[in-house]
Structures are given as structure tokens and as C-alpha cells.
Image: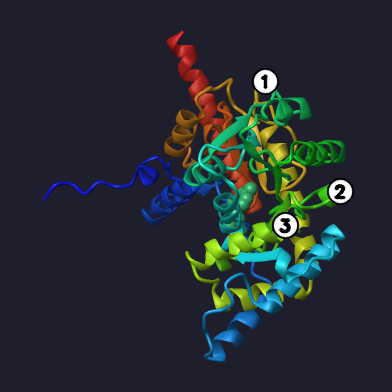
Amino acid sequence: MAELTLSKRALNIADSPTLKINALARALKKEGKPLIHLGGGEPVFPAPQASVDALVEKAHSRQIKYTPSSGTPELKQAVAQYTLANYGRKVGAEHIIVSAGAKQALFNFLLAAVQENDEVIFPAPYWVSYPEMVKLAGGVPVAVQPQKGSLQVTLGELAAAITPRTKAILLNSPNNPSGLVSDAPFIKAVVQLAEQKNIFLVMDDIYHKLVFDGKTCPNPYDYSTCGQNLVIINGVSKLYALTGLRIGWAVSENTSLISAMGRLQAQSTSCNSDLSEAAATAALLGEQSCIKELCSLLQRNRDVLMEELAQIPHLKIQQPQGTFYSFADFSYYNPDSQALAQYLLEKALVAVVPGAAFGLDGHLRISFCASQDSIVEGVRRIKRALENLTLKEDEIL
Ligand SMILES: Cc1ncc(COP(=O)(O)O)c(C=O)c1O
């Protein structure tokens, strides 16, 4: 039988490098290798008790059905409360769509807003999925590079990337992979720029409460005059350590956008999981101290990681202000981050994610959501492997 051809769309899409690393790490562990996984994107923290109780209660009801496509009224109410508490903005059910994770919320946005060849701008380093998701929606991803040595673009660099074909700016702060937070003057200027240019501004706020040293994230609504072009993406995955529920949402006062996203979702996944929505509602309405506890743990982990990385000569690193990722410049050892990550996986049995996947080669993303013991041992192994690398080079010279 002749080979059946697949769509150009499918063939043009790259694998998710982070999910690939996870799969590789799992496989090595299964083989019994003493692998240390510093490439992960989820906190090693138990789910909030309230969400587990709600999930079990829902399961015991034996009523596990389709739910309203864009989210249950209870969950939308909880998201509205969350939006009021965290953004000072009163929104209604018509401004909210609940999706299968922040990822589907973002994807729904792109499918609803982006026309063939529209450009979507985002600063590098960026979350690995942005370029592929924009391409899947028929758009053109435009990654804006910061100046050499910096991990944050300036307003001028971002503004210079805008063309008549620009449909949206996509910002992620605190940033995966750098852990850096965009400051208030920058957010204010980008909100104003997007309004002036009449383009969407999508804030991927999935880490917005995972910040350290008493920092808070600037609120884009403080600077928005109409709210029509502003879309806030959020979810329970990171803040509540509930990655497995697959619940995220988008909030926008642009009701045409939200209902278009709803129609797209209704014709793709129909609705979210009934069990997950019950559990996510309980997480949002329950005791919120779990977020503070998670932040304290992550801040301690960050400090441990920084101390260990400081022992490795020739690294350049900016201290993460949030998330659970660090993004150090390892280019002294090898400017090809893919090759370096592969070397560390093989020789040190430590999984990290190459910076090339985030649009900035020469860097490695090292997560600090693992245990402190793993962080210490993992970085020490990296140090030894890098020493061997330089020793070998010296021998060759
Ligand atoms: C920046 C960013 N946005 C969105 C997501 C997706 O989150 P979710 O698990 O809710 O789909 C991630 C997950 O790693 C992320 O890092």
C-alpha cells in the first residue's frame, strides 16, 4: 500500500522539547539509571486537599457528564472571584472561557484571532510552544531577540517588530524560562503600545503568583483604558500544583473574542472534564495558603540552586524572580545548547532543557521544582561533567 500522506500542518510542527525531555527522563529512570531530572515544568507538591475532596465527591456522585462548553457556572464564578481579587477587575461569565489548561486557552485565542499570515510577536526567550501554536493557527511567529547578554527585550525592540500584519503581542511574566518579571513601566508601555496599534495583548500569567522576595507582578488592567484588546491567560496547573487536571482559562472584556473561542472549543473538545472542573473550583475557592507555601519552598530551592551554580566558573546567570526555572548562559562550555544538554544527559545523567528550544542558544534551562537534594546533586554532577569537558579540551590543545 502506498504511504498515506499527512497534512502539511502536522509535518510542520515540531515536537515539544520539554515533553520530549520528560519522556526521555522517564525512560532512563525506568531502565534503572540514577537520573536527576532538572528539566521538569511542574512542582513536586501535593494537590490541595480541597481539590482532591471535591474530585472524589464528584466521582462518588456517579454523575460525570458533559459540562457547559466554556466552563461550569461554579468554576466561572470562581474565576471571576480570582480576577477581582488578583486584578481588581469585575468580570462576568461572558468574559471567561475555561479550557483544558492554559495551553488550550492560548490555542483557542490564536485560532479565534489569527488570520492566515498574521504575525504574533513575543520576546525571546519564550515558552517553547508559542512558535508552534502560532504556526498551527496559520500565523507567523515573530520572536524578538534581546540584546546579547540580556534576557529581557526593551520596549523599543518590541515596538520595532510591529508591522501592519501584527495581530497580537504575547507576553509571559514571570517568564518561562528566565524566571524574570517584567517591571511596571514596561507593562504600562506595552499596554499603551498595544492599544495605540489596535492589536491584542495576551498576558500569559500562568506563573503570576509564583514570585519571590516579596515581589508582585504589575497588573496590566492598571494601565488599560478599554480592556477590549487585553486577554489574560491563567490556570491552576502551576500555582496549585494541579498540572494533571488540565484546567486553565482566558479572561477578556472582548465578548466577541470569548464567544468565538467558545465556539472553537465546542467544536473541538466539546467541554472540559467534569471531574477536573469540580476540583479546580474547589482549589480556587479553598484555602489559599498553599500558594504561599509553594512560593517559600521554591524560593529556598532557588537560593540553593544559585549557591550551587555559583560554584561553576564562567556561567552567566540572572537570579530568577519567580517561576521555578533558571536560564544560565553556558556558552563558554558549548554554544550549542542542544549538544551540551545531550552531553549532560549522557555523561552526568542530568536532564536539563537546551536554550535553543526557547529561542536563545548557549543557555540551559535548569528547573528548581525538584527536591533540594536533587538540585544539589544535579548541579554538582553538571560541574564535574563540565570540568571533564574542559580537561579534555586542554588535553587536545
Ligand atoms: C509559559 C507557559 N504558559 C502556559 C503553560 C501551559 O500551562 P497548562 O499546563 O495550564 O496548559 C505553560 C506550561 O509549562 C507555560 O510554561
Q: Which residue is mark 3?
A: 254
Of the two numbered discs 3 and 2 on the same chain, state the one appearing first in sequence: 2
Estimate how packed mark 3 is, as few (under 14), some (14 to 19) or many (20 or more) residues with alpha carbons within 10 Å. some
Furthest-bottom residue in view? 61
Label 1 CA crowd tier, 10 Å (few <14, some 14–19, many 20+): few
- 395 on left or right of 89: left
Mark-to-mark CA distance, 1 and 2: 34 Å
Image quarter for residue 148? top right
Q: Earlier in the sequence, mark 1 or mark 3?
A: 1
Front in this rendered view, residue 126 or 345:
126
The reply to whether residue 34 is in sight is no
Q: Secondary structure at mark 3?
A: loop
* Label 3 with label 2: CB-CB less than 8 Å: no
Is disc 1 in contact with disc 2, using a CB cutoff of under 8 Å? no
Badge number at residue 148? 1
Residue 301 rendering spot, x and y as whole percentages: 71, 49
In the displayed orientation, state which residue is furthest to the top.
397
Q: Residue at x 72, y 54 (%)?
A: 232
* Residue 58 relative to residue 151: left or right: left
Horizontal side of residue 131 vs 314, given as left or right: left
Q: Nearer the viewer, residue 28 or 228?
A: 228
Provide the secondary structure element on which disc 1 rests.
loop
Above or below — where is 365 with respect to 82? above
The amino acid beneath tag 2 is Thr
Q: Which residue is mark 2?
A: 225
Picture layout, residue 349 above or below residue 236: above
Numbered disc in front, either 1 or 2: 2
Label 3 to label 2: alpha-carbon separation: 13 Å
Kind of residue at disc 1: Lys
**Image location (x, y in percent) of residue 212:** 80, 48
Is residue 315 something that shows in the picture?
yes
